[in-house]
Image (cartoon, rainbow, N blue to C red):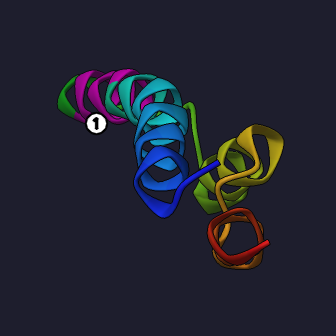
Amino acid sequence: MTSEQSAAFVNAAVARPLIKAQGMTAENMQRAHRGESMAYNDEAFEKLINDEGIGHNSVITSLYA
């Protein structure tokens, strides 16, 4: 795979969790507006990154492997 193809693959891989994270953030905002506790905390967002394999080390490995 060329470096351009690897970069495109990483960009596509980031799109999925970004959409999920935006939904998680919106839910948290709605709950804050209603005075409720947050549905998602920092751990939930970190888990999303790790589950999707888009953490720093994973991305560097995929780009330079």
Seen from the viewer's position, the closer of residues 18 and 22 is 18
- Kind of element beneath mark 1: helix
Place of residue 61 in the rendered image (x, y in percent of width and height, measured from the top left): 77, 73
Residue under numbered circle 1: 32
18 versus 55 height, above or below? above
Which quadrant of the structure image shows residue 42? bottom right
How many circles with numbers are drawn on the protein? 1
Q: Main secondary structure of the magenta part?
A: helix
Query: Relative to residue 21, is residue 52 drawn left or right?
Result: right
Q: Residue at x 40, y 31 (%)?
A: 15
Query: Relative to residue 38, is residue 62 drawn left or right?
Result: right
Q: Residue at x 62, y 68 (%)?
A: 63
For disc 1, the neighbor class at 10 Å (few under 14, some 14 to 19, many from 20) is few
Which quadrant of the structure image shows residue 19? top left
| Magenta highlight on residue 34 | no
Place of residue 43 in the rendered image (x, y in percent of width and height, measured from the top left): 72, 58
Numbered range of the magenta stretch: 23-32
Place of residue 24 in the rendered image (x, y in percent of width and height, measured from the top left): 44, 29
Place of residue 64 in the rendered image (x, y in percent of width and height, measured from the top left): 68, 77
Seen from the viewer's position, the closer of residues 12 and 27 is 12
Disc 1 marks a residue whose amino acid type is: Ala
4 versus 12 height, above or below? below
Quarter of the C terminus within the rendering: bottom right
Query: Relative to residue 38, is residue 48 drawn left or right?
Result: right
Q: Residue at x 28, y 36 (%)?
A: 32
Looking at this view, name the residue that lies furthest to the front: 2
Seen from the viewer's position, the closer of residues 56 and 41 is 56
Which quadrant of the structure image shows residue 12? top left
